[in-house]
Amino acid sequence: MENHFSKSIASFLIVLALTYSGCEARAVGGSKSTEFIRTSCSTTTYPTLCYSSISSHASAIQQNPKLLANAALTVSLDTAISTSADMVKLSHRAGMTPREVGAMRDCVEELSDTVEQLRKSMVDMKQMKGSNFAMMINDVQTWVSAALTDEDTCMDGFAGKYMNGGVKTEVRGKIVNVTHMTSHALALINNYASLNA
């Protein structure tokens, strides 16, 4: 009985050791991926936000600059879609001045353009190959830059002292977030482009 118990304990310890070493190996690989993301995000304007928004994709990104740029673009697109939906809801809020209603309508249109430009960028990133890389990466950079401009234009519509503080503050908070995500995407796309120039 004691011999059987000793063998069971020994087997358990071997399984435990193998499981632990497998977890440790995954953690080391995962830490290389997260460190790659952290280092890459350090080149962006908002490195902490960049890292926190993309690091959950570390296992898919590994240490691949194209996959990193794609992940940043995906986060930017998801944020733009969510923000666009929020702005549509906000545009129906009662009590806004005619000036706010006009700015909101323009902002909803600008965000719709942003979503479309980011979607086109995603398509182009997937179709990129060696022979068409320069042309396609240029298109992606142009689309993402245009999306960033549209986001800024939306915020500009709420500038000035005649806008309601509550609406202006709410719009600004949402637009700043999507602008930061798009800025990260553009920086990481530019980094990827420079590696393949």
Image (cartoon, grey):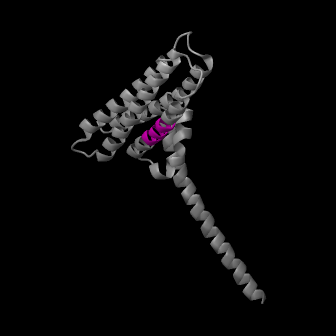
Looking at the image, residue 131 lies above or below residue 102: below
Q: Residue furthest right?
A: 2
Point out residue 171 in the picture as x, y percentages from the top left corner.
55, 25
Q: Residue furthest bottom?
A: 1
Q: Quadrant of residue 195?
A: top left
Q: Is residue 62 visible?
A: no
53 or 108: which is nearer to us? 108
Which quarter of the rendering shows the N terminus? bottom right
Which quarter of the rendering shows the C terminus? top left
- Main SS of the magenta part reads helix
- What residue range appears in magenta? 72-82
Q: Quadrant of residue 123?
A: top left
Say if the magenta span includes residue 14.
no
Q: Quadrant of residue 112?
A: top left
Point out residue 167 in the picture as x, y percentages from the top left corner.
58, 22
Q: Residue furthest left?
A: 131
Point out residue 99 in the picture as x, y percentages from the top left corner.
50, 15
Q: Residue at x 57, y 27 (%)?
A: 93
Point out residue 4 in the picture as x, y percentages from the top left corner.
73, 87
Q: Is residue 3 visible?
A: yes
